[in-house]
Amino acid sequence: MPWRNKPTPYAVWISEMMLQQTQVATVLPKFAHFVACFPNVRALAAAEEQAVLKAWEGLGYYARARNLHRAATIIVNELGGRFPRTAAAWRELPGIGAYASAAIASIAEGEAVPAVDGNVMRVMARFWGITADIMRPASRQTVYDALLPHIRRADPNRFNQGLMELGALVCRPRKPLCPSCPLARDCVARKTDRTESLPLKSRPKAGPHHAMVMLVVERQDQVLLARRPRDGLLGGLWEFPQGRRLEGESDVHAVARITRAETGYAVRVCGTLARVKHAFSHFRVTVLPVVCRCTGGALRAAPDGAELRWVTHEALKALPQTKVAREVGRQLGGEKRQGRAPPQPGAR
């Protein structure tokens, strides 16, 4: 992993933010692209937020990117470009919690603080036979406290990364590779045949599902976009205007209502694209993209404070977009490249 070769605070910080809730295989190419765009903290602080969001595109959880940018400006403007040296100091920056601060401080600075993530919780729950729910903060604190005397007798960098890798590659959630594990001899879960039942982990309740209509409104060679309010879910990203379909409402009525409410324009529906499904952390959506032509009216302010703007199809590619908007744009581009109009309503 590139951030492990002669680790610097900047590289470790960027990597740890990207690795939160994201697979390593996804992070590797995005990390290389991001540090090519912003090779140091001063370059990141000087960048426009939209450029940072665009470089982050594809990693999801965009609050992480906004927090990175905010933290970079604090490091440059308030700390004179000097990175924090301790986990406690890292936690003073936006978006950095207990795990990330410990990981950065131990890997980049050698501070003896355990970095307790999901992988480490799984390893230690099996090794010590912990039967408490590992999703509870008290369980995480128990593991942190128990690891503290051990990391103080070791190289903190190698200790934390060793436990992380053990959980990622050997002590896997399913079918752990116990014969390859250096802790196997003293592992309680292995001795008691509980490697598949430990750790105990409560599952979050399934969130609600919303049916959405997304309006792909075209005018000559332009398309109407909405930038989500900066503070909030997917803040600062661009998408096609959309709204929630009401219970029992038909697609036709939903399109008419949402178009009036979200844009102020009169439109003619040309067709639909394939529905797009997406899951957020607390709810799920199914989005129906509706391709329309603008026939009149005047642009009005969006009710949720989103910024509306006409852009060319070419300019659309340079803007940071939501995952659903990128998929809709891909479908729309495919229809245009094949030289045919989008399908008529009901075709898909």
Image (cartoon, rainbow, N blue to C red):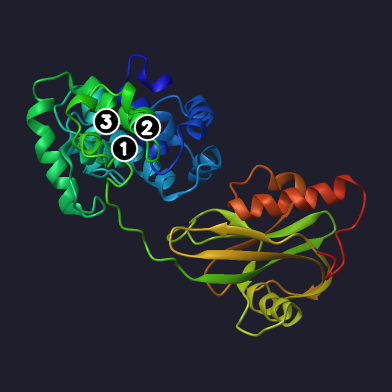
Residue at the spot of label 3: 104
Q: Nearer the viewer, mark 1 or mark 3?
A: 1
Q: Amino acid at mark 1?
A: Asn
Please state the horizontal and vertical placement of residue 101, each as a whole percent of the image.
24, 37
Secondary-structure class at tag 1: helix
Disc 2 residue type?
Ala
State yes or no: discs 1 and 3 in contact (Cβ < 8 Å). no
- Residue 211 in the image: x percent, y percent? 61, 71
Residue count near mark 1 (Cα–Cα under 10 Å), binned few <14, some 14–19, many ≥20? some
| Above or below, 1 relative to 192 | above
User: N-terminal of the two: label 3 or label 2?
Assistant: 3
Residue at horizontal 22%, vertical 43%? 98
Q: Is residue 168 above or below residue 212?
A: above
Where residue 175 appears, as percent x and y from the top left, is 40, 36
> Could you classify mark 2 by the number of other residues whose Cα lies within 10 Å: few (under 14), some (14-19), or many (20 or more)?
some
The numbered dot on residue 168 is 2
* SS category of the residue bearing label 3: helix
What is the CA distance from the residue labelled 2 to the residue labelled 1? 6 Å
**Residue 133 occupies quadrant:** bottom left
Q: CA distance from mark 3 to mark 2?
A: 18 Å
Label for residue 119?
Answer: 1
